[in-house]
Amino acid sequence: MAKMDLNVVKESQETIANRMDGKILREDDFESFRQFISHDFGEINKENKRIFNFHQFNRERDTAIVSLILGSGLRLSEVAGINIEDLDINKALVRVIRKGNKEQYVYFSKRYWI
């Protein structure tokens, strides 16, 4: 295996950026995404009562979770492990358990908070 030549294709930064374009939320996309979760999804699915009711029941929770992820950069698994006691809204701080079972306090942006 060590003698095999690998045909590694080198991509320029521009090629990588073009491939990623449309997959990354830009700054002005954050609020649009939050608006979609908190309101627009329900409007789109008004005709389906089951989906609409599910959205109405969970929209505050879902918006808060997305806001926390966008405002802190936490991983989904870290957010899933958070309890209400771990949040300090006044200091914009949350206690999370990171990889390797390490406890850490992470600040979040109040800009994306409800």
Image (tube, rainbow, N blue to C red):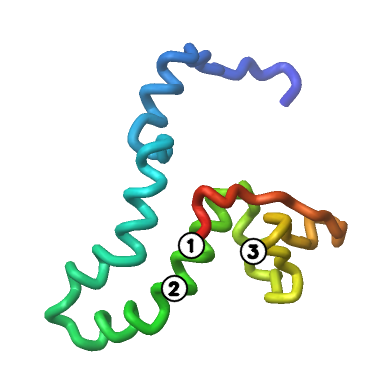
Q: Tell me if mark 1 has few (under 14), some (14-19) or many (20+) residues whose alpha carbon lies within 10 angstroms of its own.
A: few
- Whole-angstrom CA distance, mark 2 to mark 3, is 15 Å
Image coordinates for residue 55, horizontal then vertical, percent: 33, 77
Circle 2 or circle 1, nearest the eye? 1
- Whole-angstrom CA distance, mark 2 to mark 1, is 8 Å
Q: Amino acid at mark 3?
A: Val
Q: Tell me if mark 2 has few (under 14), some (14-19) or many (20+) residues whose alpha carbon lies within 10 angstroms of its own.
A: some
The disc label shown at residue 82, or none? none
- Dividing the picture into quadrants, the one containing residue 44 is bottom left
The N terminus, quarter of image:
top right
Q: Amino acid at mark 2?
A: Glu
Mark closer to the chain start, 1 or 3: 3
The disc label shown at residue 114, or none? 1
- Dividing the picture into quadrants, the one containing residue 87 is bottom right
Report the residue at 16% width, 77% height from top. 46
Q: Tell me if mark 3 has few (under 14), some (14-19) or many (20+) residues whose alpha carbon lies within 10 angstroms of its own.
A: some
Q: Amino acid at mark 1?
A: Ile
Q: Is residue 82 above or below residue 66?
A: below
Q: Secondary structure at mark 2?
A: helix
Mark closer to the chain start, 2 or 3: 2
The disc label shown at residue 60, or none? 2
The disc label shown at residue 79, or none? 3
Q: Is residue 26 above or below residue 51?
A: above
Q: Is residue 48 left or right of residue 111?
A: left
